[in-house]
């Protein structure tokens, strides 16, 4: 995997310019992606860069979502992290890249995602 490419893609997916700030999250995603690989997988396959960046973005959105749950809006309501949220969009993006890389990664490692029949609606304004 190309670390520079992963950082560039992470910045694109997360809309964060300072990738150095999130270096620990990116490093974790690199390690997680390496652990997913099947024996003999081509580690230079560009699809893995996308998968790794999507995983790093997903982890970042999980962190942010956990922090957002403690904040309140002006009206006093808890911020929603459901359908159309940044976390939801990051999860769907990650699922797409997992499917794209299915020949390169072990399928058993990703049972934690559930696939539903819901429509995929993710507009740029809610991410």
Image (cartoon, rainbow, N blue to C red):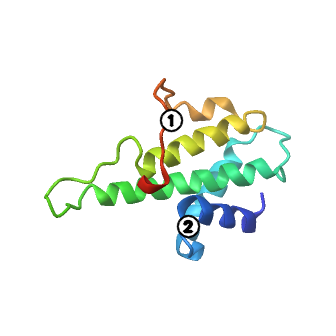
Q: Which residue is drawn at 35% across and 42% down?
A: 82
In-front residue for pair 122/7: 122
Question: Seen in the image, is 80 located left or right of residue 50?
Answer: left
Q: Earlier in the sequence, mark 2 or mark 1?
A: 2
In-front residue for pair 66/39: 66
Total numbered badges shown on the rendered structure:
2
- Disc number placed over residue 79 in the picture, else none: none
Question: Seen in the image, is 1 located left or right of residue 40?
Answer: left
Query: Is residue 31 shown to the viewer in this render?
Result: yes
Q: Which residue is label 2 attached to?
A: 24
Q: Which residue is label 1 attached to?
A: 120
Q: Is mark 2 on a helix, strand or loop?
A: helix
Q: Where's the N terminus, which quadrant?
A: bottom right
Q: What element carries label 1?
A: loop
Pointer 2 local density, CA inside 10 Å: few below 14, some 14–19, many at least 20: few
Residue 73 x, y percent position in the rendering = 20, 61
Residue 6 x, y percent position in the rendering = 69, 61
Q: Residue at x 39, y 60 (%)?
A: 64
Query: Is residue 27 shown to the viewer in this render?
Result: no
Residue 3 x, y percent position in the rendering = 73, 65
Pointer 1 local density, CA inside 10 Å: few below 14, some 14–19, many at least 20: few
**Residue at the extreme left:** 76
Q: Do the residues labelled 2 and 1 touch (CB within 8 Å)?
A: no
Residue 84 x, y percent position in the rendering = 42, 45
81 in relation to 103, above or below: below
Q: Residue at x 71, y 49 (%)?
A: 34
Q: Which mark's residue is nearer the viewer, 2 or 1?
A: 1
């Amino acid at each position: 995997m190309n670390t520079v490419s992963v950082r560039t893609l992470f910045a694109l997916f997360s809309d964060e310019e300072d990738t150095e700030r999130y270096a620990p999250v990116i490093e974790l995603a690199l390690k997680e992606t390496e652990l997913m690989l099947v024996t003999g997988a081509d580690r230079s396959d560009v699809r893995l860069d996308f998968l790794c960046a999507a995983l790093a973005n997903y982890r970042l959105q999980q962190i942010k979502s956990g922090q957002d749950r403690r904040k309140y809006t002006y009206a006093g309501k808890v911020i929603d992290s459901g359908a159309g949220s940044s976390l939801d969009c990051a999860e769907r993006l990650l699922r797409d890249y997992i499917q794209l890389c299915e020949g390169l990664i072990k399928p058993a490692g990703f049972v934690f995602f559930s696939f539903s029949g819901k429509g995929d609606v993710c507009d740029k304004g809610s991410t």
